[in-house]
Image (spheres, helix red, strand yellow):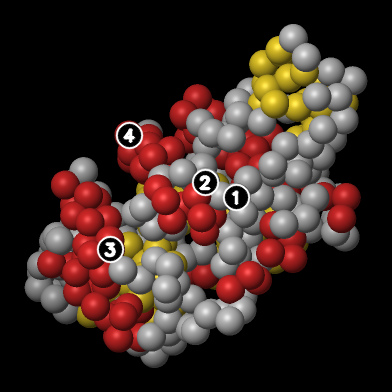
Amino acid sequence: MKRASYVVNKKDGVQCQLCPHFCFLKEGQTGICRTRKNIDGSVFSLAYGNPCAVHVDPIEKKPLNHFLPASLSLSISTAGCNLRCRNCQNWQISQKGPEEVPNFRLMPDEVVALAKKEDCQSIAYTYTDPIVYYEYTLDSAKLAREAGIKNVIVSAGYIEEAPLREWCQYIDAANIDLKSFSDELYRKLNGAALEPVLRTLKVLREEGVWLEITNLVVPGWTDDLAMIKKMCQWLSEEGFQDVPLHFSRFSPNHKLEEAEATPVEVLDQARQIAEESGLRYVYIGNVWGHPAEHTYCPFCQKKLIDRMGYRINENHIKDGKCEYCNNIVAGVWF
C-alpha cells in the first residue's frame, strides 16, 4: 500500500479528489474504484506495486497506430476501475478489488528493470484503468523517464484536471476511450459522465501528450450515426483533426452478452462520417484484414503502413513524412 494523493480531510471522513466521483470515505470504506481505502483516517492505494497482469505487447494493441510503430510495450495493470461499463471486456479484473485477484509483487523500479530486460521501448498502463492505480503509474513513469523509456496510458479519461496535469509531465502517449457522445448514455452504460472526458482530451493535447481516441461501437447503445456525427464534428471543430480515431468492433461480453457483434457496415459508415467531418486518420479495429486498419497519407492517399492485426508488413513513413509526397504525417515515429 501507499498513501494516496489528491485527498482532502472532511469532518466525518475523507474525500478522494482524484476523479469526478469525489468519493467520500468513512473509516474502512473503499471508493468506487475498489483501490483507495480509508484506513485510520488516511486514504491508501491498495493497488500499489501489485499488478494482476504483466505482459509484453506490440504497441499497436493499445491501440496506438502513430506512436513508435512495431515497438514493444511492457503492459501492466492492477485490479479495479472507476467506471462500471456494462460492456467491459476485462471485467474479471476491472470489477474486482486488488485483494480479490492473484497479484504479482512488482515495484516501480522492478517495472522499469523488466521493461529493459524485455527490450520494450515503452511501459503501458492498461487493461483496467490506470487512474485507479495512479500513484503506482506516476512513480513508475518517473523512473521510466529517467531510463529513457516512454510511458503510455490506456484510459477512459475519467480524472480530475490537477492529477491529470501532473501525470502529463511523465506520460508520452495516451489512448482515451471516448465511450459515446451522450451524457445520458455515459451514465447508463458506463457509470460516468461525458464532460470530464472531453476535458481530459483537451488537457492531454495542451500538455503535448501524443493522443489517440477509441470509440467502441456497441449495437443498440453507441451505434447511433447521428450521435457519431456529432462526436466527429466536435473533434474536428475543437482541433483534433490529426488525432487518430479508432472505431472498435464490439464483441458480446459481461452484462451485454446477449447483444450482437457490431456489423462491419456500421463501422464503415462511422468511418465515412469521421472522414467527412475532417478527421484525417480514422481506423477500424477488431476487424482483421479490413482496409481501414492501414495508415494512409491524407494528402496523396497512398498506403503508408500496411498492417495485419498487430503486425506491420510495410512502413513508408520516413523521418515523420510520407515517402511519396513528403508531407508530414502526424505521430511519434522514432
In this rendering, is residue 305 above or below 195? below
Tell me the mark number nearer the camera, choosing from 3 and 4.
3
Spatial CA distance of label 2 from label 4 is: 23 Å
Dot placed on the residue nearer the N-terminal end, 2 or 1 = 1
Q: Contact, CB < 8 Å: mark 2 with mark 1?
A: yes
Q: Residue 83 bears which disc, if any?
A: 1
Toward the bottom, the furthest residue is 289
Q: Which residue is mark 3?
A: 228
Frontmost residue, 143 versus 219: 219
- On screen, residue 74 versus residue 249, left or right, reads right
- Give amino acid for label 4: Glu
Identify which residue is drawn at 68% across, 22% down.
15
Q: Residue at image x 75%, y 27%?
A: 25
From the viewer's perspective, is the residue at label 4 or at label 1 nearer?
1
Question: Disc 2 or 4, which lies upstream in sequence?
Answer: 2
Q: Amino acid at mark 2?
A: Ala
Residue 327 visible in rendering: yes
